[in-house]
Image (cartoon, helix red, strand yellow):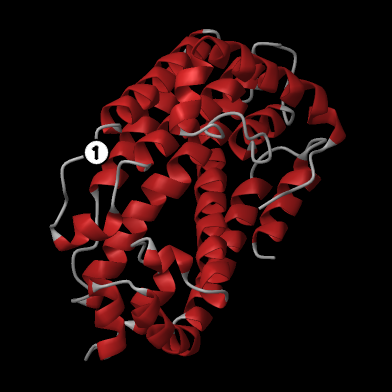
Amino acid sequence: MTFAIPSELHHDLLRVEQILQERMRARYSVIAMVNPHVVTDATDRLRALVVLAVARLGNYTDAQVVHAAAAVELIEAATRAHDTLIDEHARRTGHGANGSWDHGVVLMIGDYLFALAAGEMARSPDPRIISLYSQAVMQVCEGQLITITSLTPPETALATYWQRTEALSGALLAAAAQAGILCGDLPDTLLEPAARFGMHLGLARRLATEIRDLEADGTLLQAGNISLALLFAATEPLAPEVQAVFDHPTPATIAAVLPLIRNHGLPKARAALIEQQNAARQALQQLPAGSTTAWLNQLIDETGT
């Protein structure tokens, strides 16, 4: 998902990119063996932009804010590296296998990126940012351990979905928005609405990704990811097509279940997306207006397109 970058953030985002390149240069050849785009892909710097944009709502005078923005992108890269080790379908069905020979390298790269992030946190203008990001990393790790092992009872599956999605898609954006509050020297009372803004924005983005995938060909399903729309379609008694794609996500089972999901699950998923967008807007309204407020609102709006 691409988005326009406000002109007042161009310079600072360029500095964030420079920091990332400088930190990566020493180990780039090893990192590139795992994933050459794990940090170098500058098309999606949403977390860094949220730090910078929220800080602009306050007293944006400390150049060190770019270190807080770079830190959150390094954390995101580390979690992406670790994500490559996880087979969602194997975990759900209890058939996880031993890692391949290069899993140890991937793990070390992820740990190395976390260490780089720690260095940037130490350069951030407020020491509390270390705590915010550390708590977010713990939440992400907990989310990676959570899995939906059964579609029944449906209320349990839905509760697990939200717990996992909040951790994996919302926690880091929530911490990024809070870091912006601290970098902008804004009142601590704004930390809570900033966290809600980031959380709901992250959830909306995840739902939008799932919806677009199901409107297309269900690639995420084949990778073992369980979408909210699938859970909404998993009414009791379970349709055999739903259980089949849960047990064995193959092109054939996905093709069989997509019409059912589109008819019975997608409408509710789209409604849930709108709810998350509205919640993000309400939280943003509690933050002071500034030069980047319109862009932050636009970011929410464009999530659903």
Q: Secondary structure at mark 1?
A: loop
Residue 100 to residue 160: above or below: above
Residue 118 to residue 267: above or below: above
Indicate left or right for 46 with 137 as reference.
right
Residue 263 to residue 187: above or below: below
Residue situated in front as seen by the camera: 62 or 290? 62
Indicate left or right for 203 with 281 as reference.
left
Residue situated in front as seen by the camera: 300 or 238? 238
Residue situated in front as seen by the camera: 130 or 249? 249
On the image, the x and y values in percent for residue 211 come to 54, 70
Q: Residue at x 44, y 88 (%)?
A: 264
Q: Residue at x 50, y 65 (%)?
A: 210
On the image, the x and y values in percent for residue 232 come to 38, 79
On the image, the x and y values in percent for residue 284 come to 65, 47
On the image, the x and y values in percent for residue 46 come to 63, 39
Residue 108 to residue 119: above or below: below
